[in-house]
Image (cartoon, grey):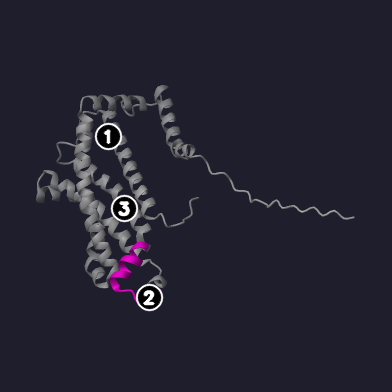
Amino acid sequence: MTTIINDTTAAVPYKPRPPRRWWRALRGWLSTLVLVLIWYVFSATGYLNARVLPGPDRILMKALELMLDGTLPQALWVSLTRVFWGALLGIAVGLSAGLIAGFSRLGEDMLDKPMQMIRTIPFTALVPLFILWFGIDETPKILLVALGVMVPLYVNTFGGIRNVDIKLVEVARVAQMGRFAIAFQVLLPAALPTLLLGLRFALALGWIAIIVGETVGANSGIGFLLTSARQFVRTDIMMVCVCLYALLGLFTDYLVRLLEKWLLCWRVAYAG
């Protein structure tokens, strides 16, 4: 008599368990923490001259001191205001110009050459001209940020639209979609990843622009604080400003990443 054993247990494919969220968040900071630890060890053991490069503990103490006496919050507020209005203006102009040039051959002929020429002009060459044309108030600093944000956003918006697969446009035409429907329902959503990548570069360049703008012809802001510290060889204050710029750039990049997750929630992309 033959006994038949019916095994109804289904084979479950092995799936590696994803790392916990707290570990993912901590892992992103591990390399930075290691570098800061090495920096601290070299400073504490005397291998680094405190006047040349203070340790992270001294920089943190100086930052707290500047926070308590109101110097750092006031400078931070001024710089944030300038970057906000400059970025807003740069995003509006750069995005509009990129959409016009990307959707239209006539728009490309009218806008692309001036934008490419502006892209090669360094900020240091524009600062004295902006001061001469617009004075030493807020206008040249805001315009400098706007220029820094505008150009990379234009380039990525234009490139993103022109790199959309032509088959998507052909399918839209077969479905008898109008020109504006194709532009805003097909081309723009397909170009969003490149556009948002350009926004990340643009905002980072906006912070570089405000550094240049505030170190010449300014009497307030983080750049002015950096320039004043350089004149008196206060390396600790200069490093506070440099670290603050780095953290602000990281924060704006994080905001764009959140916007990217929200706008591109429909996309399934390779995550490593």
Disc sitting over residue 160 in the figure: none
Tell me the number on the disc at residue 241: 1
x and y, in percent, of residue 266 in the image = 42, 57
- Residue denoted by label 2: 175
Q: Residues within 10 Å of mark 1 (few under 14, many from 20)?
A: many
Question: Which kind of residue does numbered mark 3 sit on?
Answer: Leu
Front in this rendered view, residue 265 or 61: 265
> CB under 8 Å between callouts 2 and 1?
no
Distance from disc 2 to disc 1, alpha carbons, whole Å, reads 56 Å
Q: Position of residue 19 (x, y in %)?
A: 52, 41
Which sits earlier in the primary sequence, circle 2 or circle 1? Answer: 2
Amino acid at circle 2: Ala
Location of residue 91 with respect to 112 vertically, above or below: above
Which one is closest to the eye, mark 3 or mark 2? Answer: 2
Give the x, y percent position of residue 84: 22, 46
Circle 2 or circle 1, nearest the eye: 2
Q: x, y (%) of residue 41?
A: 43, 25
Q: In which quarter of the image is the N terminus?
A: bottom right
Residue on which disc 3 sits: 199
Residue 239 figure quarter:
top left
In the image, what residue occupies the spot 36% across and 25% down?
57
Rendered view: 234 above or below 272:
above
Image: 135 above or below 247:
below
